[in-house]
Amino acid sequence: MYLSITLKIIIGLIALLAVIRLLGKKELSQVTPFDFIYLLLLGSFLEEGIFDEKVSIFQVLYAIGLWGTLIYVIEMLVMKSDRARKLLKGESTDLIMKGKVDQEALKQNHIEMEQLRILMRSKGYFSLTEIEHATLETSGTLSILPKAKETAVKPGMLNITPEENTPTYLLVDEGEVKEKELKKAGKSKEWLLSELEKEGIKDTADLFYGEWSEKMGLYLIPYEEKDQ
């Protein structure tokens, strides 16, 4: 029994290494959901086979061999066919173009504004006003092209001392006022409604997105269907 388990574990390790090599040299962040499923199901096969005495080493080898062959065929198909690649591995999606958020693209990818902000912050950007273009990659990461003013000459080159950056707060998310964020910003709902009225917005339900920072003030995005 112990000999059988030992052999199965060794074979399983070799199989996992082979599959990883088959997927190519990718960082973890570059692995697509489809790639992840490869490894997840292979792990499931091995788990069942290692501890089930009814499953022989040859059956484990057959399962691994068949699974590896299928993965190889799919990878080759993906490399040769754009249609197959889009179907099996998806394609990147532009979420922000020319500084404007594509609300329909967000909806299609089931991404909320707070999730988008999290992805932005992971890249070092804390406000939509900093971003010219943003693309959601098939791996789930966000690629960002900053606006030109964000990549301009550094203050040190001109011997000047710039103002410190200030945090931004998501005050309105898809029509809903975020009370906790208002409190963090040291503002009240009455203040927010007053400021929105100055911008010609009478109801927060008309607002898709609203952020505020002490340095930049309010940055608002109305719903597209209401932005006539």
Image (spheres, rainbow, N blue to C red):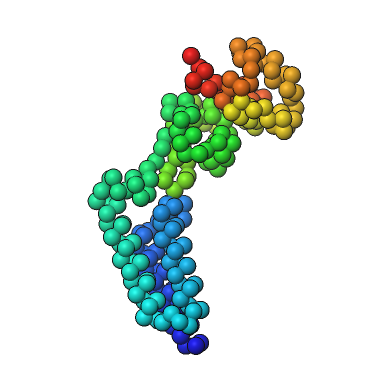
The image position of residue 38, as x and y in percent, is 41, 61
Pick whichever, 220 or 163, lies toward us. Answer: 220
Q: Is residue 90 left or right of residue 182?
A: left
Number of on-image labels: 0
Q: Say which residue appears at 35% left-offset and 50% top-offset.
A: 88
Q: Where 182 sits versus 122, above or below?
A: above
Q: Is residue 200 left or right of residue 81?
A: right
Question: Residue 210, relative to residue 48: is it above or below?
Answer: above
In x, y percent, where is residue 206?
58, 20
Q: Nearer the viewer, residue 132 or 105?
A: 105
Coordinates of residue 47 in the picture (x, y in percent): 49, 72
Q: Who's the residue at 52% across and 18% down the image? A: 226
Q: Is residue 24 visible?
A: yes
Q: Look at the image and tell me whether residue 143 can be seen.
A: no
- The residue shown at (69%, 18%) is 193
Relative to 83, is 228 on the left or the right?
Answer: right
Q: Is residue 183 above or below residue 192?
A: below
User: Quarter of the image holding residue 195?
Assistant: top right
- Picture coordinates of residue 139, whole percent (x, y): 44, 48
Outermost residue to the left: 80
